[in-house]
Image (cartoon, helix red, strand yellow):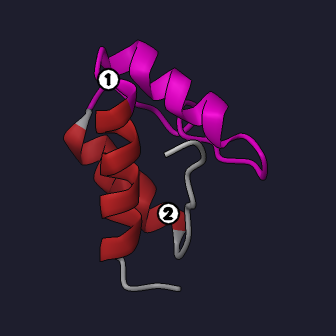
Amino acid sequence: MTTIEIKGDWNITKGKLKQKWAQLTDNDLQFGEGKAEELVGRIQKLTGETREVVENTIKEYSDACGCK
C-alpha cells in the first residue's frame, strides 16, 4: 500500500487509534489532505510499529466506522 485512503469520519478513526495506542495525542493525529505519509511516519515513530501495521490499522478502523 503506497498511499492510505482514509475515508469516513476521521474523528471515529482517530478515537480508535488513540484507544489502541494511548500515547498518541490529537496533535499526533492531525490529518491533512496529502499528509497521509507524514501521519503514518508520526504514528510509527511514537508507537514503534511497522509501517504495514500502522497502515493496516488505520484502514481497518476507517473501514469499520461504516462511513463512505
Which residue is nearer to you in this view: 50 or 45?
50
User: Where residue 40 sits in the image (x, y, percent)?
Assistant: 51, 32
- In screen coordinates, is 65 left or right of 67? left
User: Where residue 45 sits in the image (x, y, percent)?
Assistant: 44, 13
- In screen coordinates, is 16 left or right of 43? left
Q: Mark 1 highlights which residue?
A: 50
- Which kind of residue does numbered mark 2 sit on? Asn
Q: Residue furthest right?
A: 33
- In screen coordinates, is 11 left or right of 12? right
Q: Mark 2 highlights which residue?
A: 11
Identify whether 5 is placed above or below 51: below
- Element under label 2? helix
- Element under label 1? loop
* Label 1 neighbour load within 10 Å: few <14, some 14-19, many 20+: few
User: Where residue 68 sits in the image (x, y, percent)?
Assistant: 53, 86
Q: CA distance from mark 1 to mark 2?
A: 23 Å
Residue 65 found in image quarter:
bottom left
Which residue occupies 26% across, 32% down? 22
- Which kind of residue does numbered mark 1 sit on? Thr
- In screen coordinates, is 22 left or right of 1? left
User: Where residue 32 sits in the image (x, y, percent)?
Assistant: 74, 48
